[in-house]
Amino acid sequence: MSLSIHRGLNPTDREPLEALIRATGFFNPEEIDVALELVDDRLANGDASHYRFLVGELEAQVAGYACWGPIPGTVAAADLYWIVVHPDFQGQGAGAALLRAAEEWMAAAGRTRVYVETSTRPQYLPTRAFYAACGYEIVSELVDFYAPGDGKATFLKVL
Amino acid sequence: MSLSIHRGLNPTDREPLEALIRATGFFNPEEIDVALELVDDRLANGDASHYRFLVGELEAQVAGYACWGPIPGTVAAADLYWIVVHPDFQGQGAGAALLRAAEEWMAAAGRTRVYVETSTRPQYLPTRAFYAACGYEIVSELVDFYAPGDGKATFLKVL
């Protein structure tokens, strides 16, 4: 697999990004809205947006994307908001490649403490396993944060 | 002491709020900017703003304020962003009165899991002691979050 990853976001990316977010079947309507809000914020505000995007293409199709941003009020912390890979391209290392590319960008920007928040629900077990495999460690767990029985796990990787 | 607390924010509150934030001598320029951004967001967007304010008056002067908001994507969680009391009125229970009033509002809005984030620096020892005295418990501590040696402690109170 040879994923072509570029930084930034073009207006023409919006449609395939929305399609791949929906294609995963992973996110509820509220989560889809939030994901698209970040996309639209970036498209509207360009470099003034808080959100940094990386888009991965494979066989001339948008295969996945990552989104991160520096955490305001911190010297070196960054939030990794989303990594999404189209189901057609999952299991081929696209997520890990997007994560590595995002980490390179964060490190170059002086953002060497990377935080990722995920749900503690069983649905997110593969997500948590993915981050653990990529060198992330759980540094906090807030029980019942999202909803009863649905806590928030925060992962950290120091680059 | 008889603090008069009202919900909401009037354009005429901005000047005394900025004055009291500065008068504390507690916040750095970046923190002052963030505090005022929330004030301006509320004044610009009214009830459509994410931020809920409570202003406390004493002797016909603005003595302090609190700011909170529901946490998006959660069923019942709220962030308590700021409680600030003017130095002239500190030590008289104004902070605790503002916190109680905010908690009543949060509970009425179905936001019964109240999170507060503070720095682990020594400067914030009185802040942390205040929340502990008001029934908050530390549920997470992220070392070096804000800067080397400056971690983030998250408190929780379930209403």
Image: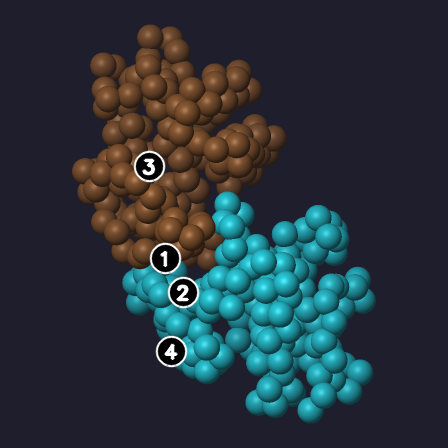
Chain colours: A cyan, B brown
Which residue lies at the image location 50% right of the left edge and 64% below the top edge? A114
Residue B6 at x, y percent in the picture: 38, 23
Q: Are marks 4 and 2 in contact (CB under 8 Å)?
A: no
Q: Which residue is mark 1?
A: B142
Number of on-image labels? 4
Q: Secondary structure at mark 4?
A: helix
Kindly give the residue lying farthest to the front in the view shown.
B148
Tell me the CA gap for discs 1 and 2: 10 Å
Q: Counting other residues with Cα less than 10 Å from the Cα at mark 4, is it few (<14), some (14-19), or many (20 or more)?
A: few
Q: Which residue is mark 2?
A: A154
Numbered label attached to residue A122: 4
Q: Nearer the viewer, mark 3 or mark 1?
A: 3
Quarter of the image that includes the N terminus of chain B:
top left
**As shown in the figure, which amino acid type bears the numbered disc 2?**
Thr
Which residue lies at the image location 58% right of the left edge and 69% below the top edge? A103
Q: Is residue B34 left or right of residue A50?
A: left
Residue B55 at x, y percent in the picture: 40, 23
Q: Secondary structure at mark 2?
A: strand
Q: Which residue is mark 3?
A: B123
**Does residue A44 lie above or below A135 as drawn?**
above
Foreground pick, B74 / A38: A38
Q: Nearer the viewer, mark 3 or mark 4?
A: 3
Foreground pick, A55 / B32: B32
Tell me the CA gap for discs 4 and 1: 24 Å
